[in-house]
Amino acid sequence: MVTVAELEHGQKGVIKEFSDNILPIKLLELGCLPGNMVELVQVAPLKDPIYINVNGSHIAIRRSLAKQIEIDIQEDPKAI
Amino acid sequence: MSKNVNVALIGNPNTGKTSVFNALTGLKQKVGNYPGITVEKKEGVCKLPRGVKAHILDLPGTYSLNTTSLDESVVVELLLNKNDKDYPDVAVVISDVENLKRNLLLFTQIKDLRIPAILVINMADRMSRKGISLDVQAMEKKLDTKIALISTRKNNGIERIKELIADYKSLPTKSNVDTSRISPEYFDRLQKAFPNEDLYKLWLVITQDVNFMPIEKKRIEDATSFSTKSKTELKKLQHRETVLRYQFINNTLKETYKVDFQSAKGLRATLDKVLTHKIFGYAIFFLILLTIFQAIFEWSTYPSDFIDVQFSAASEWLKNTLPSGVFTDLLAEGILTGIGGIVVFVPQIAFLFLFISLLEESGYMSRVVFLMDKLMRPFGLSGKSVVPLISGTACAIPAVMATRTIENWKERLITILVTPFTTCSARLPVYLILIALVIPEGRFLGLSYQALTLMLLYLIGFGMAIFSAMALNKILKIKSSSLFMVEMPTYRLPLLKNVAYTVLEKTKSFVFGAGKIILAISIVLWFLGSNGASEDFQNAENIVNQRIEEQGLTAYSKNYIQNNLDAYLEDAKQDSVKIMTPILKERARAQEIASYKLEHSYIGYAGKAIEPIVKPLGYDWKIGIAVLTSFAAREVFVGTLATIYSVGSDEEETIKSRMAAELDSSGQQPLFNLASGISLMLFYAFAMQCMSTLAIVKRETNTWKWPLLQLLFMSVFAYLVALTAFQILN
């Protein structure tokens, strides 16, 4: 299972259909919905929290929450 | 009144809602609290075209009508309660052109409540830079509303908002999303059970945790014809609602909103790299904190000293101008000095809020939270508590006010409760004089003992603040969302107008809000210190005069006169000695009378009464009096001792030498020795001893419960620590 917590700097992923675990509604409201793109923008100096761009919303969340968001990592466009 | 249009400003945080509010109302605004809670209520009046007036209510920023905080529940409660006197005739939803998609979520919810809604799209000036193009007319049609495309920065479009508000009756009230699609089966049953009610409203009542809802909710739960669902199921439906809304929004924007990423340029990435960098990030934040600290600790002393001097001069003038009597004394010494004691805080408050609003407006504050979160987490605090805690090192009053920026109520309360432990500048005069008296000169590893002691006192204060935060985090049973989610807004140049409004509004709220309590307490303290019931107090002048007649001036007064004369002699002004001698004698007499009066005033008796309590700490009744009077403000401790030892001048050296000469009850050793000195310093490190802090905590928590608990805890704790220290060292 790959989650937002595993993203590297500048890497993107697409949010997968949620399984049973229920994400906080706030996160969904800010655009964290299945099918939307997430990008890791920054990681705090102490490795936590992380700063992501999801669907145009720039938000900081803690790693523990990031671990609950399953994604498919987008292949690095440069590598193709 | 009834003709006024009720307008509610609603919007996501960081959309410039406050700027719109300021632009609509100008200075005609009023800031208060919602009854019983500490959410700020901002209202104002706005003149509309054709002679209509609007009452504008600026609601707290929220991402949706799904509440997770007190601030948000205020919004929902208002929108669901048609009987509320502020229930809006029209909702003005503020959005930001860059985050339109997310902003529309809230808009569609309000539309579905059938409240006439206007959509304001702010920051239109950024469109070309971000490569955004809009088809406003098509969007109006899709969203079934009227749109005002504005820029508060460029002051564009405000008139359009006013026109739309004036025309609110022509706004359509159809819903955007067919909410029954959330769960047709569920909504069907709801409809059958409550045939005459708005279903979406009922849905919100069922799913939200809001203050007045338990009753409403119970009504629904008790309805025999209807069975609701479990919490988890309802949550899933809420998710479904969000998905449905985003489908509608995506559909709407697909044809009306275009972004050309090629032409989008942003400072965000570059600035973020520097400002959240593992070295530069902290270095810059540290520099900013240092500047803030410097401003409230150092720069504000100039205006504060000026205010101090002016008020003393005015008080002196009043005493000389008005006929002497009780009323003049009350006016000059009680009331005027009390007001002076309030106004003197204004420069510090203004400086702190100048910086804080710059940090907030620019978007930097969110980066601070991002940087500091991991460090503050163990103490139940977040990065937002850092600024108040550090400012508390200058003065707790603006620091406590600064906690308003902390959204999470539990965290805000903890920060308010622990901030007074940090070493504020009023403790400094007390520390300095005691350190000079009881800490020996000498060095340890090149550092003087005295400097080390001062540093230790600062560390103890900060340590205690952190430690109590940790304890409170465990103890306080306040339901608060542990969810950490902070929006990182785009960097923006702060709008000077908004900054100025914030500074003005905060200063006003302190002077008129907390000021009343401070004035009342200071008048009481003044009264107790300058009045007495006993014969001794009434006849103070005669008694002291008689004593001087019989026994001459006290040894200390003689010394005082001689020292002054010596100083004149050194200046080789022989003639002046003749003139000065009677003046000095008169001054010494006045000082002895003042001392005698204070000793026999109400507060003097109180000081003597508490002597058995403070004796185990190594204090005598004179220190007892000083501890009591310094509840006004800690630095008063020094001034009171000066009066009681009948040292007229405020010269620190004079007071110090007088204190050094004071012997304890046994007459064997100085009263201010290492044990009693440390005990006193520790007492002042932990005791609340500041009526202004008490007043501002009352104001910020909107109840007497917290300030009184805080006062009790801090005093008892300070007493115990001072007791232990004295008993060990002695």
Image: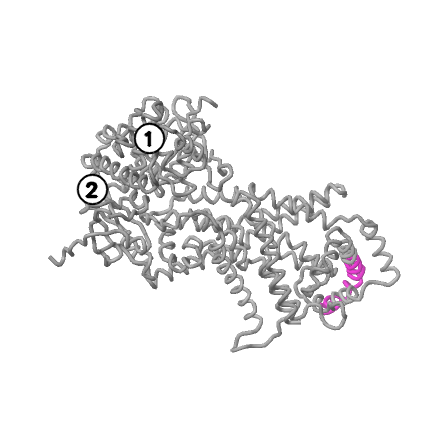
Q: Is residue B564 left or right of residue B465?
A: right
SS under mark 1: helix
Instruction: Using the image, name the chain to which the residue with label 2 belongs.
Output: B
To which chain does the residue with label 1 belong?
Answer: B
Magenta span includes B584: yes
Q: Pointer 1: what residue?
A: B200
| Residue B75 appears anywhere in the view | yes
> Position of B66 compared to B432: left or right?
left
Residue extending farthest left: A80
Q: Where does the image place residue B489, in percent across and percent down from the top left?
A: 32, 47
Mark 1 or mark 2, which is nearer the start of the sequence? 1
From this view, report whether residue B215 is shown above or below residue A35.
above
Res B500 quadrant in image: top left
Secondary element under disc 2, as helix, strand or loop, is: strand
Q: How far apart in space, not on screen, are marks 2 and 1 (Cα)?
A: 33 Å
Q: Is residue B651 above or below residue B313?
A: below
Q: Is residue B85 above or below residue B723?
A: above
Q: Amino acid at mark 2?
A: Val
Q: Which residue is mark 2?
A: B259
Q: Which residue is pictured at 64% across the width and 64% down the height?
A: B723
Residue B353 visible in the displayed image: no
Q: For residue B177: magenta?
A: no
The front one of B492 and B95 is: B95
Q: Main secondary structure of the magenta part?
A: helix
* Location of residue A80 in the rendering, given as x and y in whole percent from the top left corner: 11, 57
Residues shaded magenta: B565-589
Residue type, mark 1 in image = Tyr
> Could you classify mark 2 by the number of other residues whose Cα lies within 10 Å: few (under 14), some (14-19), or many (20 or more)?
some
Measured as percent of width and height from the top left, residue B103 is found at 30, 39
